Image: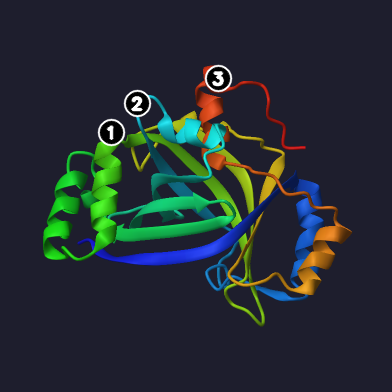
């Protein structure tokens, strides 16, 4: 059963760094932050993030990012750890306006995410909640651009939250893997690595970054990078899209 939309709005800064450097930074953050509650109690200090990205037949979302369109958006499914019939799956529009990231999402189940079922589910939801502008945007964006599931991306995430500001988040994304797929359950043997020796560090906040965080950035010489997991993963499965003009270092 489709559940009401959830809304997020925040600033996000990304950094790309080698794994050994990331492992050294985490203790510095833990002086001011705690592990995400979703990690506490798990056997590992990470959880899996899974995204199935939509795109148009001519990869319009990819080329919007590559051409530097300032106000752009993409559509994806997202779920965490392994999936089963009871797992919530979020259908999400992620908008990027310069440094501001705005997300709206709805929670579905696996049955509702089937390619032949999704459009019916969204149209029914629109009728039941006709004042919800997000449903209108979601249906229009998907249909106008002929968006279909194209690419599955999976990675391990270590997440921290601020001790004094719970909306301050720092995430470390390791072992990014991808494959061309239209399914929420892709073939585990067909994954390929995306910069397997690196980590994507993201700072996510609503107001201002605290001084201690600026000091960590300076101490470890972190340099911001406009890193797109979707675009760099897509290059791995479609080499003709790679212009050999990208380096994370």
Q: Residue at x 53, y 21 (%)?
A: 241
> Counting residues from the N terminus, which is met first, the one under dot 3 or under dot 1?
1
Tag shown at residue 239? 3
Determine which residue is flagged by label 2: 57
Q: Residue furthest bottom?
A: 164
- Residue 2 image position (x, y, % from top left): 22, 61
Q: Quadrant location of residue 75?
A: top left
Determine which residue is flagged by label 1: 146
> Counting residues from the N terminus, which is met first, the one under dot 2 or under dot 1?
2
Asked whether 25 or 76 is in front, the reply is 76
Label 3 close to label 2 by CB (< 8 Å): no
Q: Secondary structure at mark 3?
A: helix
Instruction: Reply above or below: 234 against 213.
Output: above
- Residue 124 image position (x, y, % from top left): 12, 55
Tell me the crowding category of disc 1: few under 14, some 14 to 19, or many 20 or more residues within 10 angstroms, Cα based: few
Label 2 close to label 1 by CB (< 8 Å): yes
Q: Secondary structure at mark 2?
A: loop
Q: Quadrant location of residue 165?
A: bottom right
């Amino acid at each position: 059963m489709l559940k009401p939309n959830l809304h997020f709005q925040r600033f996000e800064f990304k950094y790309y760094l080698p794994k050994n450097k990331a492992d050294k930074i985490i203790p510095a953050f833990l002086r001011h932050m705690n592990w995400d509650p979703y990690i506490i109690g798990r056997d590992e200090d990470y959880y899996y993030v899974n995204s199935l990205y939509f795109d148009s037949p001519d990869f319009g979302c990819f080329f919007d990012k590559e051409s530097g369109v300032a106000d752009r958006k993409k559509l994806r499914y997202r779920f965490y750890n392994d999936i089963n019939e009871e797992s919530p799956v979020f259908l999400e529009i992620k908008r990027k306006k310069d440094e501001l990231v705005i997300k709206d999402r709805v929670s579905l189940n696996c049955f509702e995410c089937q390619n032949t079922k999704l459009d019916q589910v969204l149209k029914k939801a629109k009728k039941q909640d006709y004042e919800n502008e997000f449903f209108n945007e979601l249906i229009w964006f998907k249909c106008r651009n002929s968006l279909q599931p194209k690419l599955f991306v999976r990675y391990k995430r270590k997440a921290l939250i601020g001790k004094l500001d719970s909306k301050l988040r720092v995430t470390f994304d390791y072992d990014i893997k991808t494959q061309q797929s239209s399914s929420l359950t892709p073939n585990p043997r067909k994954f390929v690595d995306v910069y397997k020796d690196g980590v994507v560090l993201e700072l996510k906040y609503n107001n201002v970054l605290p001084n201690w965080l600026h000091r960590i950035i300076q101490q470890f010489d972190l340099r911001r990078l406009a890193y797109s997991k979707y675009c760099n993963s897509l290059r791995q499965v479609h080499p003709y899209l790679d212009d050999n003009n990208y380096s994370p270092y």
